[in-house]
Amino acid sequence: MLAPIVVLSEPLPAAGMARLAAAALELRVLAQPTGAALAAAVRDADAVVLVNERPALTAAMIAGAPRLRLACRNGAGFDNFDAAALAARGIPLLTTGAANADAVAEHALYLLLALFKRGPAYDRAVKGGAWPRDAGTRPRELRGKVAAIVGYGRIGRRIADLCRALGMRVMAVDPSPAEADVAFVPLPDALAAADAIILALPLSPATRGLIDAAALVRMKPSAFLVNVARGAIVDQPALAAALRAGRLAGAGLDVLAVEPPAADDPLLALDSVVLTPHVAASCPEAIDRVAIACADAVVAGLAG
């Protein structure tokens, strides 16, 4: 009996590749993670693993892969899969969101603290010879503040735990709430009530541009926006305009619509913005857990 063929867009981290190598599988790793290479490779694949955000597994590729019976993302986000086309074929789409939930939640908390406590701004000021202690630059407490978490999946629930540990009040926005440990509210109400909006939801046609100019207008001028999800969920020009006009206190962003950003991206010039280069899930511990979870999911899935 022929071994199932598993196509990988890139090698998994070593821990995951070792798990796959120990199984009775034929592994084919793309020489370059491009759409053209993926389209050619999946034609006779039994399973496909996308290791990073690119390339995308399109409906056309799925239609041209008659043997395909499993798709897996080495991570939580699955916006580079045509999920509808997979569902139409009855092909399971596996993700590994539980494996990196702690790392991403901790990073969301870091961004939240950086904004409330003005850490990066103080660091820049002191290194530049200033000693800012006036009323307009003081840090703020998190205890008693309201954190609204948009997307209450594995990562969102872990963010909620960390926020509660700091004495914050938590509300959640989710299209299909399944938990009883939090108050679920509609997005417009959450935007108006929250001191911090934290985005932890998948990118989809319904969520693209969700935080647009109209949403930003609903937020308190003293509120912060944190995004550890996908950059395209936020209308970045509208966000920059709101920050420049003082209609929002600041933003902490691990993800951007274009990565890396263009040199003239207006967000880069704003001291009220704290940026990190899409590294929330990049802790070595999380990288290994995700790779192992991905490999184990593929092996189990192909075994039925």
Image: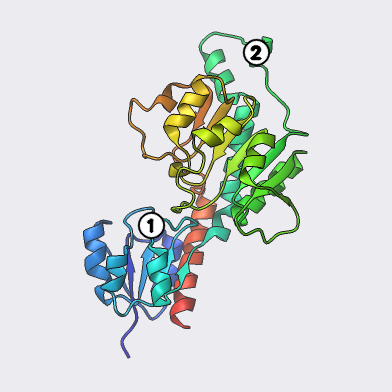
Vertical relation: 265 (above or below) 48:
above
240 or 155: nearer the viewer: 240
Secondary structure, mark 1, is loop
**Mark closest to the chain's N terminus, 1 or 2:** 1
Residue 20 on image: x %, y %: 41, 72
Is residue 118 visible to the viewer in this orientation of the structure?
A: yes
Mark 1 = which residue? 80
Spot occupied by residue 176 in the image (x, y as percentages of width and height):
62, 59
Residue 155 in picture, x, y percent from top left: 60, 52
Please state which amino acid type lies under the numbered disc 2: Gly
Q: Nearer the viewer, residue 122 or 179?
A: 179
Residue 53, compared with residue 224, is above or below; it is below
Q: Secondary structure at mark 2?
A: helix
Question: 92 or 11: which is nearer to us?
Answer: 92
* Location of residue 218 (image quadrant): top right
How far apart in space, not on screen, are marks 1 and 2 (Cα)?
43 Å
Q: Residue at x 77, y 33 (%)?
A: 143
Query: What amino acid is found at the position of numbered circle 1 in the picture?
Result: Asn
Residue occupying the far bottom of the picture: 1
- In the displayed structure, 25 sits above or below 246; it is below
How crowded is the residue under tag 1: few (<14 C-alpha within 10 Å), some, or many (20+)?
Answer: some
Q: At 46% from the left edge and 30% from the top edge, which residue is drawn?
A: 238
Percent x, y for residue 253?
50, 36
| Residue nearest the viewer, comparing 244 with 304 | 244
Instruction: Name the residue that disc number 2 marks.
Output: 136
